[in-house]
């Protein structure tokens, strides 16, 4: 039954890490007409159907109540990136570089999958299909999926999800760079299995990743069918959230916005006191380098 489950066209949240993808994913996941992978499901993608009723409470008791990089609340049933399921199932993810920093260059090819071998791409695609089929069987609704790396994988997602819809959220590149620095600094202690040897290269890796992800996104954007892509600014989502969410629903032809609007309003009221991290101005040398990010970002309408 599971392997015959038909996957309804998913909605992918695209965007470079620290661009507001988690905030948008959390909001869209409030719509009861969609399903989403949970923290427990992405950490135990092969066994969650059997284990979740008995073990999810253990995760809830032992995990921190908020994320280390930005203090956003999390729990075992919180919406979570499907990328972590790919880490567990295939190890073909750039996130593996945080655990094995001595081999970080070997994992960077999985941001775009372009330099992966055909066999590696096939395994990655089939694993994602398997996980989504399992989620579809579990939740019985179209899925809202989010992984920052998916922004650079549209060409590999469309062949397996030809009717998928995409919403891309983008943010001031200076803020993204500063916040990504903090992410790398905070997430390593939670995941590393080796002592990093070249921390001084982190900033260059962040710059290179930003440029490559945007270059690939712009190369693939026109291949998305008309009416299946919506692009929004994080600043608009932050200042005019309901207007921005309604635009997403209308542009992508999603179900009636008015039905879920009260849930959005309740969530926004409940999280109104959340304080974003405040970042110090960039040092002069990094500020000069970061000006290069604007050219990567300029093609976003």
Image (cartoon, rainbow, N blue to C red):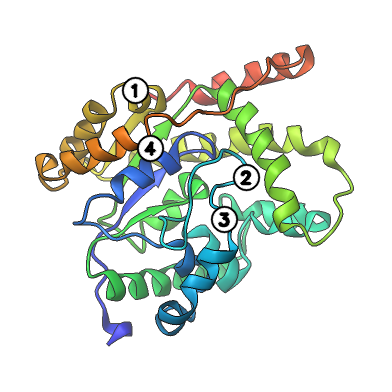
Spot occupied by residue 268 in the image (x, y as percentages of width and height): 31, 34
- Which residue is drawn at the image coordinates 38% and 37% (left, top)? 168
- Which mark lies nearer to you, 3 or 2? 2
Mark number, residue 113: 3
Secondary structure of the residue carrying tag 3 is: loop
Q: Write down the residue under mark 2.
A: 68
In the visual, does 213 lie left or right of 33?
right
Decide if residue 121 is in sight here.
no
Spot occupied by residue 196 in the image (x, y as percentages of width and height): 85, 50
- Which mark lies nearer to you, 4 or 3? 4
Name of the residue lying farthest toward the right: 197
Q: Alpha-carbon distance for marks 3 and 2? A: 28 Å
- Local crowd at mark 4 within 10 Å, few (<14), some, or many (≥20)? many
Q: Alpha-carbon distance for marks 1 and 4? A: 13 Å
Q: Alpha-carbon distance for marks 1 and 2? A: 25 Å
Q: Write down the residue under mark 1.
A: 236
């Amino acid at each position: 039954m599971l392997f015959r489950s038909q996957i309804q066209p998913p909605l992918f949240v695209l965007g470079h890490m620290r661009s507001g993808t988690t905030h948008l994913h959390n909001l869209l996941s409030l719509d009861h007409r969609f399903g989403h992978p949970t923290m427990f499901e992405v950490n135990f993608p092969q066994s969650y159907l059997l284990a979740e009723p008995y073990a999810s409470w253990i995760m809830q008791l032992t995990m921190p109540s908020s994320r280390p990089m930005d203090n956003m609340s999390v729990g075992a049933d919180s919406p979570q990136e499907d990328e972590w399921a790919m880490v567990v199932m295939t190890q073909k993810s750039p996130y593996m570089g945080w655990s094995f920093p001595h081999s970080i260059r070997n994992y960077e090819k999985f941001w775009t999958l372009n330099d992966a071998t055909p066999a590696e791409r096939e395994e990655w695609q089939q694993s994602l299909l398997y996980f989504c089929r399992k989620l579809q069987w579990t939740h019985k609704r179209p899925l809202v999926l989010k992984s920052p790396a998916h922004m650079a994988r549209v060409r590999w997602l469309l062949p397996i999800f030809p009717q998928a819809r995409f919403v891309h959220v983008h943010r001031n590149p200076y803020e993204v760079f500063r916040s990504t620095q903090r992410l790398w600094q905070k997430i390593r202690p939670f995941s590393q299995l080796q002592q990093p040897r070249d921390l001084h290269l982190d900033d260059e890796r962040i710059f290179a990743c930003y440029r490559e992800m945007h270059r690939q996104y712009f190369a693939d954007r026109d291949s998305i069918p008309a009416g299946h892509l919506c692009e929004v600014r994080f600043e608009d989502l932050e200042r005019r959230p309901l207007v921005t969410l309604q635009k997403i629903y209308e542009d992508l032809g999603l179900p009636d916005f008015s039905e879920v609007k009260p849930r959005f309003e309740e969530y926004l009221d409940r999280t109104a006191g959340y304080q974003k991290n405040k970042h110090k101005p960039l040092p002069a040398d990094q500020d000069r380098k970061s000006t290069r990010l604007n050219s990567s970002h300029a093609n976003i309408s």
